[in-house]
Structures are given as structure tokens and as C-alpha cells.
Amino acid sequence: MAEPTENVESNGKNNGGAERQKTRKSFFKLHPGAKWALLVVGVALVVGGIFVWRYYSTHESTDDAQINGNIYPISSRINGHVVAVEVENNEFVKKGTVLVRIDPTDYRVALERAQASYATAEARAQASRVGVPITSLNSSSGISAAQAGVQQARAAISAAQKQSLEAQARVKQTQANYTRAKSDLARYAQLIKKEEVSQQQYDHAMQTAEADSAAVTAAQSAAAATEQNVAQAQARLAQAQAYLRASNTGPQRVRVSRAQAAAAEAAVKTAKAALDQARLNVGYTVVRAPTDGIVGKKSVEPGQNIGVGQALMAIVPVIGLYVTANYKETELKDMRPGDPATVHVDAYDRDYKGHVLNIAGATGEKFSLLPPENATGNYVKVVQRIPVKIVFEPGQDKNHILRIGMSVEPTVTTKK
């Protein structure tokens, strides 16, 4: 009883397989081009797979990226009273545009005072510069004159001493004459008593003695005068020597004069620095935009008193923007500076051309305030992300529509 059943089942299976084979044969017989179509599709899939593999093996993209730039904080460099604020938030300004005006009155007064101080210092320096050669000339001429004075005083002493010797000789001579005249007068006095000589001879002897006595007095006076001349000449020599010693300090006076001139020059430089600072302070009363950009975070109003370094506003640049793309470390194997990149901006659904400028020296976590420490027992390996800086090619953002903080999707084409 079982055998007929098995035969029926086996016959059924054989009949089903035959039917399917017949159907296939009939399909390809009915559609002879299907084989070629399947072949083309297969080749297309293989080629497409190769292109897809090739694309993804040479293109690295990430959605962890945004546009960045250097935001310029605007602050005051001086203390002052704000008299005008020329811009508003979200206003586009060009480089050099006036942003804030500070009352310049006090700083202009300080500038005038600095100009006066500089003029005074310059005049003193000019006088000191002129005084140096004058002091030097006076010093050299004073030494020469003092040396000549010493020599003249010594010559005068020598002449006075010779005159004194001559005067003393005359004193001795007149004294000798007077002694002889006194002896003659005494002898004539005895002879006249005996009437051995005439009265005339006696009178003549007396006159001669008186004359010789007067000559002695005169010679003594002349000798005393010559001695006085010697003393005066010696005093003049001492005076000339003192003047010479004073003149020998001339080089020191020259050095002092030069030091005073140097101090005056230093004072000029100090006054010039103060003048320059005063001019800068007057210029700082007008705060200008350092670059083209958009005003933001304005926190200053007219009438406000501000201090040095106080934040007034910020300028967000519209040029020099770049992309910071946080790629996984496993995606940087073939990435190098200079590789071309395509940046898709989500806000405008538009692509921009760029290239890799550089790759950060550490992962983003290492630059965080509290970098993670993995030296623990529950360490779990996490794929890290490393910032890659991508810059735009010039001339693509002519309308300045890109903004810092926009989300982008960069794709870098690596060179394998």
C-alpha cells in the first residue's frame, strides 16, 4: 500500500521540476533579449560597485563640522566719555569705519601740554649742545693762559729778585759812601777847629755826608720796594698756579657739560615719547573697525563712561572664514594638507570648493577644559576626533553670505 503513494509523490516532484524548467525555457524563449539585459545589469552593478568603492576609499566626509573665523572684540584703549555710537547690531561695516567716538577734549589739552614740554626740552638740549664746544674751548684756552701766567709770574719773580739784589748792593754802596763821608766830616771838624781847613771845605764835607745819608735812606727804601715787588711777584705766581690748577679741571668740566647735554637729549626723548603717546590718545578717541564684518554684541551707548579694555562690541568677519571638521582618527590615514575638499553648506544647500590647510596637533578632547584620563580600570576604547582646518578657495563667497557657526558637511578627496 505504501509503494503506490511514494510513486505518486516522486512522480509529482518530477512533474513540478519539469514544469519549472519548462517555464524558464519558455521565458528566455519568449524573451531572448533578457539574457543580454541581465548581463548588462550585472556588468553595470560590478562597475558601479567598483566606482562606489573607489569613491568611498578616496573621499572622507563628516557632518561634525562648522564654519569658523576670528571674531574681533572691540574695546577702548583709553578712559573717556562716549559722545557718539555710529553703528548698530547686525550692521555691515567696512574696515576703518568709525564705530564709537569718545570726547577728545581732555586728550587734546594733554597733547598741547606735551607739545610745550617737548619744545622746552628741545631748547634746553640745543643750549647744552652749544655749551659743550664752548666749555671745551674755554677749558683748553684757560689751561694755556694759566700756563703762560705761571711762566710770566716766575719771570717777574726772577726780575724782581735781581732788582732786589741790585737795590741791596746800592744800599751797601751808599752806606759805604755815607761811612766815608761821616769820617771825612769828623776829620774836617777837628781840622776846622785848628783852622787847618777852610769853612768851605768843612761845609762841603758836611753836605756830602748829608747827601750820602739821604742816599742811604733812598737806597734802603728802594731795596724795600724791590723786596715788596718780589713778594708781589711770588703772590702772582701762587695766583697763577692756583688758576692753572683750576684750569686743569677743564676736562672734568667738559665731561660734565657733555653729561648735561646727554641728559638734555634724554629729556628730549622722554618728552617726545610723551608727545607721541598724547597724539595716540587723541587718535584713540575714535574707535574704528579693524576689518570688514558685521557688528554684534554692542554694549555701548552715548553718554556712557568707559574704561581701558572695556568691551564695546564685536566685529564678525565675512572674509577669511574657514571650516573646522572633526574627523575620526580612522579617517585621517590618507589625508594630507593640500588635499582638495568640497564643503556643502546646509543653510543654502550649496557646495563650495576648498582644500585642507592643516591638521590639529591633538584631539579635540585634549583641548577641552577637563581632558579625559584613560588610566582607569574601566577604560573603554573610543574613536577620537581630530580637528582638520579647511579653507575656502578665493572668490567663492562674493556676496558674503557665509556665517560663523553654520553647519557644513565637508568631503575631502585624499590622494592614495
Image: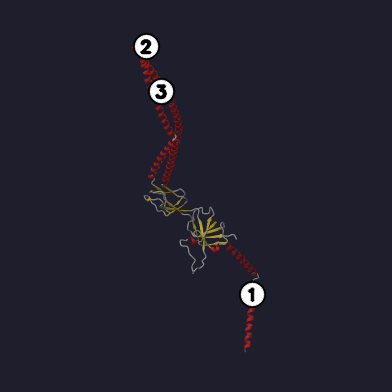
Question: In terms of depth relative to the viewer, which is nearer, 84 or 225?
Answer: 225
Q: Closer to the observer: label 1 or label 3? A: 3
Q: Residue at x 38, y 22 (%)?
A: 220
Secondary structure at numbered mark 1: helix
Q: Is residue 127 above or below residue 381?
A: above
- Sooner in the amino-acid sequence: mark 2 or mark 3: 3
Question: In terms of depth relative to the viewer, which is nearer, 41 or 239?
Answer: 239
Q: Is residue 211 visible?
A: no
Label 2 and label 1: CA atoms lie apart by 202 Å
Question: In terms of depth relative to the viewer, which is nearer, 146 or 234?
Answer: 234
Q: Locate residue 56, reporting x and y percent.
A: 57, 63
The amino acid type found where label 2 is placed reads: Gln
Q: Which residue is mark 3?
A: 168
Q: Closer to the observer: label 2 or label 1? A: 2
**Picture quarter containing residue 90?**
bottom left
Q: Residue at x 43, y 52 (%)?
A: 74
* Quadrant holding the C terminus: bottom right
Residue farthest bottom in this picture: 1
The amino acid type found where label 1 is placed reads: Arg
- Sooner in the amino-acid sequence: mark 1 or mark 3: 1
Label 1 and label 3: CA atoms lie apart by 172 Å
Q: Residues within 10 Å of mark 1 (few under 14, many from 20)?
A: few
Q: Tell me, for residue 201, which label it has, or none.
A: 2
Q: Locate residue 127, reporting x and y percent.
A: 43, 36
Q: Is residue 183 visible?
A: yes
- Sooner in the amino-acid sequence: mark 2 or mark 1: 1
Q: Which residue is mark 1?
A: 24
